Every structure is written in C-alpha cells, then in structure tokens.
Image (cartoon, coloured by chain):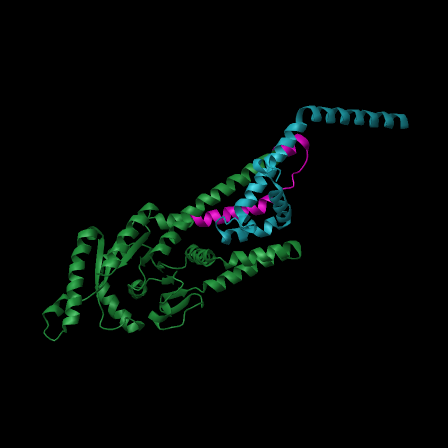
Amino acid sequence: MDSHKDGKKGLASIKSAIRDFVYGMAAHDMVTYSLRTRMHMENLFMLIVMGDMLGIPVLPPYYSLRLLPHVVPHVKTWKRTLLRDRDVTDRMFGG
Amino acid sequence: MFLKEIVESHKYLLFAGKGGLGKTTLSATTARYLASRGKKVIVFSTDPQASLTDVFERDLFGKGEVELAGNLYALEIDADRVVSEYQADVRKKILDMYGSVPEEIEDYIKSASAQPAMSESATFDSMIELIMAGRYDYYIFDMMPHGHAIRFLSMASLLDTWINKVVDIRKDSQEVDERVRRMSGKKTHGTEETGILGELQDIKNRLDFMAKIIGGGDTTALFYVVIPEQMAIMDTETAIAEFKKFGIELSGIIVNQVYPRELLSDPDVPEFLKSRIRMQQSNMEIIHRKFADKIVAEVRMMDREPKGFAMLEKTANMVYG
C-alpha cells in the first residue's frame, strides 16, 4: 500500500518537475516580460491619476480623490519605484 | 427665433457673459416666467460670486434646493463646503477599507483639495448631480463669467478623453493579469481592479451624460448676454469663437441694459445721459452688424435695480410679454 502511495507521489513530483521545466523553457521569460509590462502600466496609471503626489500636476484632482481609496496600499511602492528609476543620462554620467 | 420660443422649447437653459451684465437677473427672470406657466423650474448659480441671493432677496448660499414660490426653486452652492464634505467622504472610505489614513495620503487629500480647480470641479459635479436626478421641467444655469464658463463647459469633453485613456490603461492591465494567470497560475499584485474600473466607469457615465447635454442643441440653449458697450461686444466676439472651438453653438444673444431711445427727444433728460444713450445707439448698430442673426432679445435698462419678486415679475413681463 505504502509503496503504491510512494509511487504516486514520485509520479506527481516527476510531473511537477516536467511542468516546471517546460514552464521554465517556454513561458518563464514571457511571464517575466508580462509582469514587467504590467508594472510599467501600473506606474503609468498611478502617474496619470496621482501625479500630484510627486509634484507633477495631472488633471484633475477631484477625480483622483475618488480613485485614491483603491490605490492607498500601492502608493509607497509606486513612489519608491518611480523615484528610483534613472534615465540614460544618469547612467552615462553616473547619477 | 425669439427668446421666448427658444426658452420654452429647451429643457436646459444657460446664461453666460461678462460679469455684471445681468446674467443672474435674466436667469431669475426666465425662471420666474417659466414657473408662472406651471413648470417646475430650478435656477442654479455656477458663479463662485453668486448673486441669486441678492436677486431673490433671500439667503440661498449653501442652503441646497430652496423653494421660493410654487414651482420655482433656486440653488446656490457653497463650493468650499462641498469640497470639504467630499474630502471627508474620501477619508471615511479609506478608514473603512484600511482602518487608518496614512500620513502621506492625508497630506495628498489636503493639498489636492486646496487647488482652485477643485471647487470648479465640485460645482460641475453638483450640476451633473442635479440634472441626473431629473426632478425639474426646466434647469436654468447662471454661468460664471466668460473665460471660466468656456473652460467649465468644455470640461465634460476634455475629461471624457482623459477618462477614456485611463480606462484603456486599466483594461490593458487586466488583459496582462489574465495572460500571466493563464501562463503561470500566479496573480499579479496590482491595484484592486474592480473598484477602480467601477469608479472610472461611473465618472465616465456622468461626464458622457453632461457632454451630451452641453452639446445637445435640441435640449440645451446657451445664451450670451451683452450690453451696448465696446468691451462687452469684443468679449462676445471672442466668446462665440471660443465656444465654437469646443463644439458649443450659441443659441442666441440677449442685448441687455439698453436705454430707451425716446429719452433723446425729452428736453428734461440731462445731456450727460443723452450722450450715453447716443453711445449706446452707435454700439447697437455695431451689435446688429456683427451678430444680427443671433440676437434673440433686447432688454431695456430698468429704472431701478431688478431685485425681489415684484421687480422680477415686471422684468418677466417686459422680456417675455
């Protein structure tokens, strides 16, 4: 009975390993790329609706406030990401 | 078409023009006239220096929709109060959702609310709210002076473009979330989607509704008030061109505060006043030359300030016969 169970377990772990392998080979890069795209979209969205927080006035604060409750948990991360981002000249001149 | 016909056949009536030319008086007069014909009417002031309180001789500021007489209502909003109530709503929503309001969020709420555009938006939103509730037969809007009025009325179409872009970004993000979930079984950690899209959709619906009303020639009439003076004439020319830029067509021009021409032949009238009447007469020619097809009414200068119900009745008789 136990050996049957062990066999099932072994098969499952082989299946999972194969799935991870295939995922790693075929999809991992795509997923990473998609997540990066998603992050940029999130930053763009936050910049458009909450730009005022960074001193970039983007119309209109009345409607930004309506969206504010939904983005509260992400404000810190977003500000950190955006202020950490460096452009080409920063890289060239070591800024 | 004459003013009376246009007024009776349009549900939303907007009176715009330079400050001090009689927009409020004409709005109140029109409201009085329509109410006397058994229609339920509200007159709303979008001007931060609203003077409906003075015209109706009753304190209306920040009092909500006040019934002045049978069928006749007036609304003069206190934009600052609307903004602070709105601020409190946002704060409460955050508290309900997360249990506290982080300091930087609190700072943002305060700084956003201090911007001048805020009270304009709050007034605009109150205007949408009032129309959407649909409780009246006629809505009369006493607009703020020209430049502000143009920006105010074009707000719906400009914001609509902005909202469409934001909605597109959210929808694209949703698609990426779905793709990631399908490929990896993982959930992304973006902002909460349904709530944001719901809010955006609601803002969009309101703006679409308002853009349709402002641009809807069948239901909305926009009047521009001018007096026979050079500066007012120049202002009207600019306004017509600017309103056109935003796709808003003027329904008619009302020439207000016109001195009776017959005073010129009255020997008892002082020369000072006669000279003013002559100036007005030559400006009237300019007005007719420039805006002939747009003039829907000429309203005489009253012998005293048109304030209070009795005077408004008199003005209504004069304007609407």
Question: As drawn, is B52 to the left or to the right of B86?
Answer: left
Res. B101 image quadrant:
bottom right
Residue depicted at 65% across the width and 41% down the height = B189
Residue depicted at 61% across the width and 48% down the height = A75
Q: Can residue B271 be seen at all in this image of the molecule?
A: yes
The magenta region covers B179-208
Q: Is residue B318 above or below residue B1?
A: below
Judging by colour alone, the chain drawn in cyan in this rendered image is A
Question: As drawn, is B107 to the left or to the right of B165?
Answer: right
Q: Residue furthest front?
A: A93
Q: Position of residue B39 (x, y in %)?
A: 33, 62
Q: Position of residue A74 (x, y in %)?
A: 63, 47
Q: Is residue A25 above or below residue B114?
A: above
Q: Colour of chain B?
A: green
Q: Can residue A1 be seen at all in this image of the molecule?
A: no
Q: Position of residue A8 (x, y in %)?
A: 83, 26
Question: As drawn, is A4 to the left or to the right of B185?
Answer: right
Of residue A89 and residue A55, the one placed in the foreground of this image is: A89
Residue depicted at 75% across the width and 24% down the height = A18
State the count of labels.
Answer: 0
* Residue B186 magenta: yes
Res. B60 image quadrant:
bottom left
Q: Main secondary structure of the magenta part?
A: helix
Q: Is residue B129 above or below residue B52?
A: above
Of residue B117 and residue B78, the one placed in the foreground of this image is: B117
* Residue B192 magenta: yes
Quarter of the image with the C terminus of chain B in it: bottom left
